[in-house]
Every structure is written in structure tokens, then in C-alpha cells.
Amino acid sequence: MHNSELRAARLRSLFDSQANRWEEVLIEYDYQMPKIVLNTLTLLSISPSSHLDLGCANGHLGFVMDRSGFRCDRQGVDISSEMVRVAGETGSYSLTVEANLEDGIPEELNSSFDLITALGMFEFLEDPRAALSGARDLILPHGHALLTFKCSKPELGQSGSMSSPNLNNGKPIQTWHHSKTEVNEILHATRWNLRSIDKFDAYCRETPVEYWFVVATPTK
Ligand SMILES: C[S@@+](CC[C@H](N)C(=O)[O-])C[C@H]1O[C@@H](n2cnc3c(N)ncnc32)[C@H](O)[C@@H]1O
């Protein structure tokens, strides 16, 4: 098996094992991202009619958006078959697809979307470009992408190095983190305009983890 296949297998098994307790994990760590998405949609007066959720996990975001008045046609992609199964059961997703986004956007998604989200997901990809470029092909001209990237910190070393959040029963998993400049470059290379980028703490309990929250629109 190649390194990338091994990594994908490890991610699949990690998130498969968490699918039935993901809701508890989000509460345990005081997960902030869905709240930030809701605030941003309200602030920018975005009311999506078609939403693609990349790394949808158990469908928590779709469920929360529906409950908060952002009901729309929604599709989700995740590498974990168990997460995809649980997300499908929320009733908030018309289609859920199991796929490795490192390989780009799966062909099953043949619609266009006016909202694309990717929260807490790009840190698991060595290179987010294929996914972002594929997402760019599916966004409507007036659409928005709400994305997060884990912030690089001097103690984490270079982007691409190993960190060990000890999610996987103590086994380290590889995550990638980016500086503001790198996020800018990645978006530029994948034909997205960066509208805003703000730092926030995504998991607030115990040790807060810093992320970039990005609003992007398609280049003309
Ligand atoms: C930390 S969770 C965040 C889930 C969700 N977006 C949220 O904010 O609650 C990361 C999700 O990304 C998925 N994921 C990780 N690597 C992936 C990949 N290469 N392709 C597709 N999904 C991936 C995991 O299976 C997991 O469900």
C-alpha cells in the first residue's frame, strides 16, 4: 500500500469508529464551527438553495442549518462510510457520497451549488487543491464557500509535518496546517477569491485549537 492509501485507510477507520458518538465528541470539545457558519450566513445575508458539505461527518452541520432556518437541498461527502450512513439518516442531506476528497470531488455530484462548506476537513488532506478546484467547478457564480484550515504554529513545524491530536486511541494521525499566506496561495491556485480570513478557536474545551475561517467566492 502507498503512503496515501495507508493514510486514507487510517482516516476511514478512525472516523468510522467515531460515527455513532460524533455528537458527543462535538459537545465534549465545545465545537464552535457550526455556530460560526450560522453567524456568517446571517451576517452576509446568504440563504442557500443548494449546499455541498465536504467532510460532512455525521451531518451535524446540515441538521443545525435546517433547524436554524437554512433548509435547502444538501449533499455531503465524507471518506468514512459510517459517517456517510449516519449523515444520510438525519434527513438533512438528499445525497451522501463516500469518497476520498484528496482525489478531488466525486463524479456522483453532478449538480451546482450556491454554498460549499468544508469545516475541520482540510487538515486531513496533504493537498487540498484537487478538492478545492473540483468544488470551484461546481459553485454557482453568485455562490460562496465557507472553509476552515488549521492554523500553522511554530511548534507544529512545517506544513505537512506530523502532529498527534491523539484522536485514534492514542495513535498519532497526520494533519496539515497552513499560514495565512499559504491559504491565500491555495485559493488563488484553485480559482477562488478570498473575501475574508479570520482566526478562531474551533474546539474550546481544555486546549483551544486555532483555525482560519475563510469566506471565498468564485473568480469571474
Ligand atoms: C473533524 S471532522 C469534521 C466534520 C464536520 N465537517 C464538522 O464540522 O462537524 C472531519 C471529517 O472529515 C472527514 N475526512 C477526513 N479526511 C477526509 C478525506 N480525505 N476525504 C473525505 N473526507 C475526509 C472525516 O471522515 C470526518 O468526518
Image (tube, helix red, strand yellow):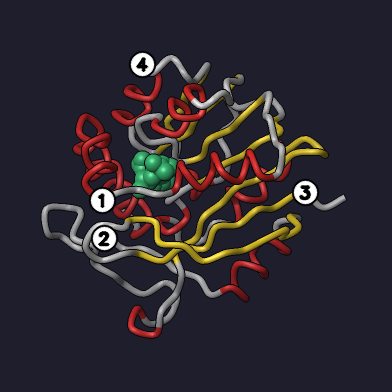
The CA distance from mark 4 to mark 2 is 28 Å
* Residue 9 percent location from the top left of the image: 29, 46
- The residue carrying mark 3 has its beta carbon less than 8 Å from ligand 1: no
Q: Is residue 187 above or below residue 98?
A: below
Q: Earlier in the sequence, mark 3 or mark 1?
A: 1
Q: Amino acid at mark 1?
A: Tyr
* Residue 59 percent location from the top left of the image: 40, 29
The CA distance from mark 3 to mark 2 is 32 Å
Residue at figure coordinates x 51%, y 55% from the top left: 148
- Element under label 4? helix
Q: Amino acid at mark 3?
A: Pro
Residue under circle 2?
A: 173
Pointers 3 and 2 in contact (C-beta within 8 Å): no
Residue under circle 3?
A: 218
Q: Earlier in the sequence, mark 1 or mark 4?
A: 1
- Element under label 2? loop
Residue under circle 1?
A: 29
The CA distance from mark 3 to mark 4 is 31 Å
The CA distance from mark 3 to mark 1 is 33 Å
Q: Residues within 10 Å of mark 2 (few under 14, many from 20)?
A: some
Pointers 4 and 2 in contact (C-beta within 8 Å): no
Q: Amino acid at mark 2?
A: Ile
Dot label at residue 89: 4
